[in-house]
Image: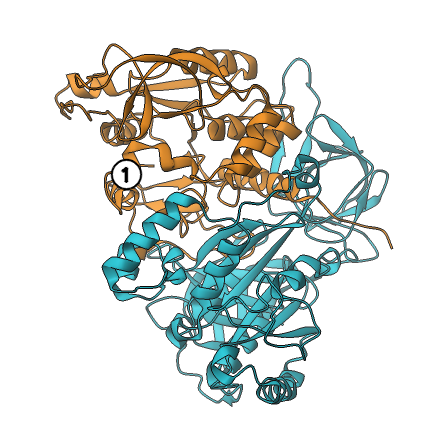
Amino acid sequence: MKKYNLNHLRELESESIYIMREVAAQFENPGLLFSGGKDSIVMVHLAVKAFWPAKIPFPLVHIDTGHNFEETIKFRDDLVKETGARLIVGSVQETIDSGKVTEETGYEASRNLLQTQTLLDTIEEYKLDAALGGGRRDEEKARAKERFFSHRDEFGQWDPKNQRPELWNLFNGRKRLGEHFRVFPLSNWTEMDVWQYIYLDDIKIPSLYFTHERDVFLRDGVWLADAPFMKKRDSEKVVRKKVRCRTIGDITNTGVTLSTANTLEDIIQEIAATRVTERGGRADDKRSDSAMEDRKKEGYF
Amino acid sequence: MNDTNEKFSTKAYLDMELLRFSTAGSVDDGKSTLIGRLLYDSKSIFEDQLEAVQRASIRRGNENLDLALLTDGLRAEREQGITIDVAYRYFATPKRKFIIADTPGHVQYTRNMVTGASTANAAIILIDARNGVTEQTYRHSYISSLLQIPHIIVCVNKMDLVDYSEDVYESIQEEFSAFAAKLAIKDIRYVPISALKGDNVVEPSKNMPWYQGGTLRYILENIHVGSDHNHIDPRFPVQYVIRPQSDEYHDYRGYAGRIAGGVFRKGDKVMILPSGFKTTIEAIDLYKDELEEAYPPMSVTLRLSDDLDISRGDMIVKENNVPQISQDIDVMMCWMGDKPMKPGTKFYLKHTTKDVRCMIKEIKYKVDVNTLNRIDDGQELKMNEIAKVSIRTTKPLFFDSYRRNRNTGSLIVIDEGTNNTVGVGMIA
């Protein structure tokens, strides 16, 4: 008997492509939230596949905190050039300058929470009615119940009681004026799936993910990258170490791991053996048990 | 937690299949403990998650590690100690990747169970060995069979509390199979377990030498999923039309979508619905590759030999194998909305890639999910109730019975005022 089977990565890929095409079909003005991290890079790759040989029919949207790794910005610009995609950049600095939000102070200061306001402003300015994001359900407890199509009200807020049931392949993207959807094509992918897919399809990723030497300091058991805007305590001494990023957020809240992983295979082996979740190194999630849930309610990712 | 010595094999990971299964059962049945055990024992739980749960277990007053806490997500749930929604969990063994649709067991969450079951290849039905087959067992089994889940695994749990008695297990097995015969479920397996102690979940039980079947993990790893899709009736709902109109691809016109049934091959003679036009498949594109054939659940782009006017909502089929075409359909419907449905009300309806409006004309009969008896009540359909209804749509749909094809046999109904999905239907 002939075997009509897909391996699980191709099945996940097929599902994600289906979701992207649904977004293009159901919404007037979608955008793809691009952070420069591996999940959004995989999303761009999937979008290219979904609409080939036409260009991606929606822009990439980058909410720039101003605290990015330099490599992230360069990678983004190269990718935009390569795919011919349109790029929209929302600037957190501008949101701060306008007085809408206040810069955090103190040692733990980060622009992570401020991103929410910039994101909502950008969505409103460009009248985006759907924002594709790279969120996965395995990432964090509050995402385990997230839908593919996640309804946000006119304040950009996520109400867990307001989400629509999703059955089979049927996605209900109907909404009123002023509301929008966040759509997560990678919902069923795990961290390991993403890396394996990068390996399978030979997808280019920023060098930050591979081992390199960097000035870092230790805070609360997590190594953080040093940068001019990082406020350090006297006890936090800067040293040079061989590190790599397992997840890429802002410099202020991305923990780097001591690692000599040089190739994709090395990274995959390292993750397979690892004992801490991907986001375990993210200081933004540590703030409270329900950190992610609270941020989502306010309109974050 | 033991550290595994086996080197992780990237090659093996790239060659795995995906199995989606649903878990149904109440808090007391130990469902969350079972899931926690599956994640924990296949080393899919990380140290920091474990630490967080240890902290929460102590805070809550549990001395032992409460594996159920690993799966409870939202704040309200953690406070109430029950799961409210459908939660998706992920784990992988060296043989397969799994997606668990974890659903509550209470009858007031029937709609959540229906949701979780809709894409499942397998259902785990949990029975507390002390209680045997209960109303809840009937309900979960009925929903699994209604949603056409191909494989059912009956786990008789808490065997440690009945002294690992073979008699207890066998009498439960007998009672369940007698009842399941009414449901026409194709594939049922049974396994005696203790989620709390770990017997027969991942490791074989030392306490039940009389059980010669595989562990739950072994069963999950070996269920044959390949034949669960319909490979017989070719169905391609057009999802999106790709027209680059660029210099390089000036004349390219491709119909993108997900194969919903059957097998399509390059060179196949096909027919377009609703127009009835006939043409040939010139190529099947998947990004830059041209495929010889495509089957479910692949997402591809079809190019046709003729220049036709085809749009989203149309369907590509074969001339000698046409779906049913009608504006009048009979559907088994589960109501999901807060507001009860009164016959005569109009809704939006979504079926494959088609959007139409409809009216639910009549409630023919309801089904009591706890007893499977029919109830003669055509007044209104309340949330969590299941009934056979007749629907009339504004435009004809191209469909198959749900039994034949879960993709072309399913639909959802949307409230015109709130835009919420209020009903889901399986075409009879």
Q: Is residue A145 visible?
A: yes
Seen in the picture, residue A173 relative to A231 is either above or below; the reply is: below
Q: Is residue B291 above or below residue B406?
A: above
Left or right side of A259 for B318 = right
Quadrant where the N terminus of chain A is found in the figure = bottom right
Chain holding disc 1: A
Q: Position of residue A180 (x, y in %)?
A: 35, 40
How many labels sit on residues? 1
Nearer the observer, B369 or B336: B369
**Residue highlighted by disc 1:** A286
Per the image, label 1 sits on a secondary structure element best described as helix
Q: Quadrant of residue A132?
A: top left
Q: Chain A is shown in which shade?
A: orange
Residue B4 is left or right of residue B187, and the answer is left
Amino acid at dot 1? Lys
Colouring scheme, one of rainbow, by chain, secondary structure, one colour: by chain
- Chain B, which colour? cyan
Q: Residue at x 51, y 66 (%)?
A: B23
Camera-side residue of B225 and A222 = A222
Image x and y of residue A74, in percent: 44, 10
Dividing the picture into quarters, in which one does residue A124 lie?
top left
Q: Mark 1: give few (<14), some (14-19) or many (20+) Cα within 10 Å.
A: few
- List x then y, in percent, for residue A67: 29, 17
| x then y, percent, for residue B353 | 58, 49
Residue B342 in sight = no
Quadrant where the image shows the C terminus of chain A:
top left
Q: Residue at x 66, y 68 (%)?
A: B151
